[in-house]
Image (cartoon, coloured by chain):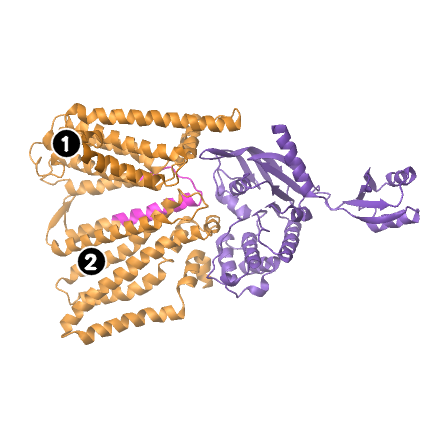
Chain colours: A orange, B purple
Amino acid sequence: MEKILKWNAEFARNLWLEFSLQRLVAMPAIILLIVVLIFTNSNDTEQAWRSLHYFSVAGFVFIGLFWGLKNAADAIMEEYNEKTWDWQKMSIIGPWKLIIGKLFGSTIYNWYGASFCWLIFMVTAIEMPQPENEFKIGILLIISMISLPGLMILLALQLLRKTDGRSKIKSNSIFILGILLLTFLSNIFGLGMILNEDHVLHTWYGIKLGVIDIVLFSSLFYCAWIIGGLYRSMRAELQYSDTPSWWMLFIGSNFLLQFGYFFWNQNYPGIAALAVVTGLLFCELIFLVYFLFFTDAKSIVNFRLLKNLLTHKEYRHFFKNVPLWLISLPVALLIGLLSAVFFMFYPENGKSDNIFHDILLEGGAKPFLFWLSISGFVIRDIGILLLLNFSGRSKRTDTAMLVYLLLLYVIMPLLTKNIGLGAAFYPDIHVSAPGMVIFPILEVSIVMFLLVKRWNEISDMVLLKEGNLSV
Amino acid sequence: MIFIKDLIYDYSDKRALHKVSFEIDEGSITALVGPNGSGKTTLLRSMAALAKPLSGEIRINGFDAFTQPREVHLQVGYLQDLFGLYDQLTVIQSLRFTAHSRMKPGMNVNAAVELAATRAGINGFLDKKVSSLSRGMRQRVGIAQAIIHQPPVLLLDEPASGLDPEARYSLSHLLLALRDAGMTIIVSSHILAELEDYSTGMLVIQEGRMIEHRLLKAVTEKDNYLHIFLRLTQYSNAFIEFIKTMESVKEVIVTDKGISLKLNEKLLSSQQLLKILVLNDLPIVEFGQVKMNLQDEYIKTVSNYRQSKA
């Protein structure tokens, strides 16, 4: 234990907490009992192997993923709620070691239990119709066991950024549970796709790959980036400050990964591949902007700090302090603009057989106007949430904003549908060109006016208290 | 050792620290006093490089808290007001974990754990689970964790709150021992009576503004002067003049209640002074050391601030 303590104190602490003789014995004993139960209740050996195989997947998912995700999320949340996080922040344990200590330490008992299930899965895979694919799924399970708890810790670290250090994190655990469920369901969906379509071949930069290989490769890619993201978030928690270079690298590599599936693909000739990939990336980035914006701190103090840094031309410090959503927004809009231009010059063939066929079939300058409309509504939404945050009255501004979004994107369009005012609330490609841009421009102008007014009011308030100090 | 200049810290609609500036010498114990919400905790967290101020300068033992926060973490032991402990670990496990996570590689962990446990007076509880400890014992474990890496600066936020009188007494002794071992300590507290037992300086913070930084005892000449109060059955100018002419005595103040003076202990002990006074037929009915009243000093400072503000 002394050696482990010296290597990684956080990992050793988790070992102390997670392992006891009783727990070490209980896990394999229960699994063994279930294995015996399956064998004694099966009609023949083949059925027993098959049942055992499915049990091992279920066992892995429950012990390793479900339970592991909860432990991983608690690894940060509990420290914060129990007021021990400051000890960790002031420790000399570096970000990598702290990540290893948290990611593998908090889930060490899950790894212990899941490893038995995994071994059963791999052994019983030999008896399955396509053992090679089963082995690949085995590897996918291991990757999930790293990436999903990693994602939970990443989320928890992200949520810590908007805490005030005094109140406990309560409602967010429900939010995390929701994300957990989503990731799990997408995993199931992925598995289903693998099992049903393993014969289909796709190309990635000309290399022919089966669906399972693509899923495996993509999982590995995103797992690596989750670890990378964890490293950067942990560095931020430990008071290191970095420019968003890794984030930009992630966006770039994500583009390259996705572009590979359309490159040299006869269905997407020439500029079509670029249009579709930039279109996809634009959607992903807009989703990320909303997600990061909701989960990040939006206090006026951060913006005041950024303004101060810009005023003093401290650009490097500015980029070290700028929130990721704010850096992602212009990147998203730029990629969206590129995408709109590519869509305007999209080749005629393949227009209807495309996920963006609505945009393509409209043609003309519509892709550009649609981009303008989306950009406007995104800026409007961000402006409203900032207004709510700057009001300083409500502690549940994010929840209030979700209600506003429901109003703006669901209820109001439904109510105004019959009078043709749907485009007043959300981007609609099918309305006329002026209708597409007038509403977002008008709404952005109103929100920006209110935002500037609010900013000045708060600044005046602080100035009044402070005397003549500039803010 | 601690240098703060023009520190500004903002919350959304409130400035928590208004251009706070002060310097603190090495080997001192400074009482950080002020009402709730005055900015004490924000100031301590900024000094511990756990909170990021809007602007200003913080240097701890030469390290800049803005640009070198990790180095500052090594220089500082910080115990927050509502701190947590790892309840499921034993005390020794907690200390060993903290030692390994806070000490530089190559330092003697066993010796550090033993020293911290001895200083905090928790040697007899090492095998107990943290969750089973009393409030006072938890406070001691917290302090042991904060000092385990032997930092040159120790920041304690309300360390005496919730402690019983005996635990408070031991805390005073512990702080003096740490000061003697070379630590520079800042203690925020509401219990001024205890702070005056060991504080060499007082920082008064009000509405985020530093309104007073007073040296209570010079760090370099600590304990050289004693405040003595004496009461006589009758007062005469001759008696008072006699006292005033004594070389070891200064600042003689005569009031209706009696005579207060400062005695240089290096030149004369209080026992010798009493003997001299009695031998010279001064009708003494009361003689004793006066403890400085930090509470009065604090109230005076705060009311002066309020008057000037009005």
Work out whether disc 2 and disc 1 sit on a shared chain: yes
Q: Front-most of A365 and A373?
A: A373
Q: Is residue A346 rendered to the left or right of residue B288?
A: left
User: Is residue A298 part of the magenta span, yes or no?
Assistant: no
Q: Chain of mark 1?
A: A
Pointer 2 residue: A136
Pointer 1 residue: A418
In the image, the segment drawn in magenta is A221-247
Majority secondary structure of the magenta segment? Answer: helix
Q: Front-most of A462 and A359?
A: A462
What residue is shown at x 25% (from left), y 36% (from top)? A407
Q: Front-most of B189 and A262?
A: B189
Q: Is residue A62 visible?
A: yes
What residue is shown at x 32% (from left), y 37% (from top)? A325
Q: Is residue B9 rendered to the left or right of residue A119?
A: right
**Is the residue A415 above or below the residue B221 in the image?**
above
**Cβ atoms at labels 2 and 1 below 8 Å apart:** no
Identify the amino acid type marked 2. Lys
The answer to which quarter of the image holds residue A269 is: top left
Q: Chain of mark 2?
A: A
- What SS does tag 1 mark? helix
Q: Is residue B292 rendered to the left or right of residue A380?
A: right
